[in-house]
DNA sequence: CGGCATCCTCTTTGATACTG
DNA sequence: CAGTATCAAAGAGGATGCCG
């Protein structure tokens, strides 16, 4: 039905690209790193623009290469769940490096670019830290894009996942670029509010997890 | 003449892939990370199988994106030199992560895969270290593939570059997989020799730089 | 509805030949 | 040396149909 195209080079980079270098492939891995396990339709939702046959092809290839597994969830759910194998999870450093390199390019995106709020999860996991390990737990609800994202800081650990928070100490609402810049500490609170962010609740909860570096970004 | 295809997603990973996600692109970056500056024909030699129009296209795109620069070398050389910009050099963590992930896949390659010995340079830079900083300098010449590669250890630093050594303390000759496995400490000396490697000179020079971990690989 | 497969069109790639 | 030109083959994108 298809043949794996290969660079056919004795080089680790080339071998990696043989497996994950095709269009959409690493974005599929991103989806699975964020959520843990996804249904086919979850993947389609998180990968706006992908053709359905292409998604099916990529999933089959990734399965053959041992990067993902498909698991038939038992009734009454009766759906197929895709998730990364341990080998697939080892792609995390690759995604981290690429995401970091690409971050400065976000500024050049048109305003109508696609956005799914769960895409914030991995960058937030990289950049946020609990700076007050001994403080009481705090919860932040981030409202931008298609669904809320919850940030919980407690005991020196930060947990981030898609979905609404129960009783957030603070909520942050606004367009993705402003909300993201605020959370990543690239904008201070006042500037973010000036640019349309709405912060409802205790701003100290934000300061607890934001990266310390505040660059002097303007635009 | 062309339009940059974009995933159009507000996501750092997707933005990175917009710029360096096309086929061959990261391999071009590899070539430039290894050598520093390359002529068009050097790139063709290091990228066996690439179509020349594709190479020209990719170079133009990378230049537009600020990843590489082209520099007209003055007479009497009178050639164009391509090299990475600082922004392009920041792709090093990406290549490192991908190369590391792909390394285990090298074993599955057919024996007639393409090989250029300078492809060893980056992995060697990652894995080798000078374990005897106070010892006298040593030089290793690696002979496999199309040209020799030189490893120099001195004062705690290891320098690796393509090209012959002047007066090597030891030379290692053999097929790429065996030579590479020996240098990376995945095979011990005896096993490597059994499998066709020829080590001429002082094997202690090898031990000085090899990674300490010796895994129990067999095949 | 979830998980694809098919069909069709359009773009990108690969191979080769040729040029300033 | 550093490309451009040309053309066939493969892949991507989009719409729709199928089947449990």
Image: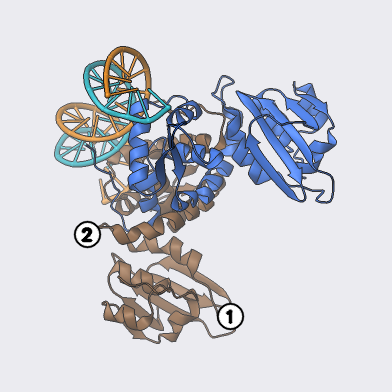
Chain colours: A brown, B blue, C orange, D cyan
Q: Between A64 and A185, which is closer to the camera in this rendering?
A: A185
Q: Is residue B136 left or right of residue B93?
A: right
Is there a contact, CB below 8 Å, between mark 2 and mark 1?
Answer: no
Figure label count: 2
Q: Is residue A23 left or right of residue A10?
A: left
SS assignment at label 1 = loop
| Chain containing the residue with disc 2 | A
Q: Between B205 and B155, which is closer to the camera in this rendering?
A: B155
Badge 1 local density, few (<14 within 10 Å), some, or many (20+)?
some
Quadrant where the C terminus of chain A sits is: bottom left
Instruction: Tell me what residue is drawn at x 52 percent, y 34 percent.
Output: A15
Question: Which residue is tagged 1?
Answer: A133
Badge 2 local density, few (<14 within 10 Å), some, or many (20+)?
few
Circles 2 and 1 on the same subunit: yes
Q: Between C3 and B79, which is closer to the camera in this rendering?
A: B79
| Chain containing the residue with disc 1 | A
Query: Which disc number belongs to residue A56?
Result: none
Compared with residue A188, is residue B127 higher up or lower down, i.e. above or below?
above
- In the rendered image, the residue lying farthest to the front is B76
SS assignment at label 2 = loop
Give the image quarter of residue A121. Answer: bottom left
Q: Is residue A203 left or right of residue B153?
A: left
Q: Is residue B76 visible?
A: yes
Compared with residue B195, is residue A73 higher up or lower down, i.e. above or below?
below
Q: Is residue A76 visible?
A: no
Residue A22: percent from left, percent from top: 39, 38
Quadrant where the N terminus of chain A sits is: top left
Compared with residue A154, is residue A70 higher up or lower down, i.e. above or below?
above
Instruction: Tell me what residue is drawn at x 49 percent, y 55 percent.
Output: A96
Instruction: Tell me what residue is drawn at x 28 percent, y 41 percent.
Output: A52
Question: Which residue is tagged 2?
Answer: A112
């Amino acid at each position: 039905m298809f043949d794996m195209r290969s660079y056919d080079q004795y080089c680790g980079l080339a071998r990696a690209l043989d497996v994950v270098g095709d269009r959409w492939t690493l974005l599929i891995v991103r989806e699975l790193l964020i959520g843990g396990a996804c249904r086919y339709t979850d993947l389609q939702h998180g990968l706006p623009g992908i053709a359905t046959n292409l998604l099916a092809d990529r999933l089959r290839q990734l399965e053959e290469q041992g990067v993902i597994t498909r698991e038939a969830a038992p009734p009454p759910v009766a759906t197929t769940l895709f998730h990364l194998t341990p080998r697939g999870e080892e792609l995390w450093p690759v995604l981290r490096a690429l995401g970091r390199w690409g971050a400065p390019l976000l500024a050049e995106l048109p305003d109508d670019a696609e956005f799914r709020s769960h895409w914030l999860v991995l960058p937030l996991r990289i950049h946020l830290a609990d700076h007050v390990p001994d403080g009481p737990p705090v919860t932040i609800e981030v409202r931008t894009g298609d669904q809320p994202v919850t940030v919980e800081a407690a005991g020196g650990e930060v947990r981030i996942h898609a979905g609404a928070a129960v009783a957030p100490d603070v909520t942050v609402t606004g367009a993705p670029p402003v909300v993201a810049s605020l959370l990543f500490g690239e904008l201070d609170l006042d500037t973010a509010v000036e640019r349309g962010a709405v912060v409802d609740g205790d701003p100290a909860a934000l300061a607890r997890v934001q990266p310390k570096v505040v660059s002097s970004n303007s635009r």
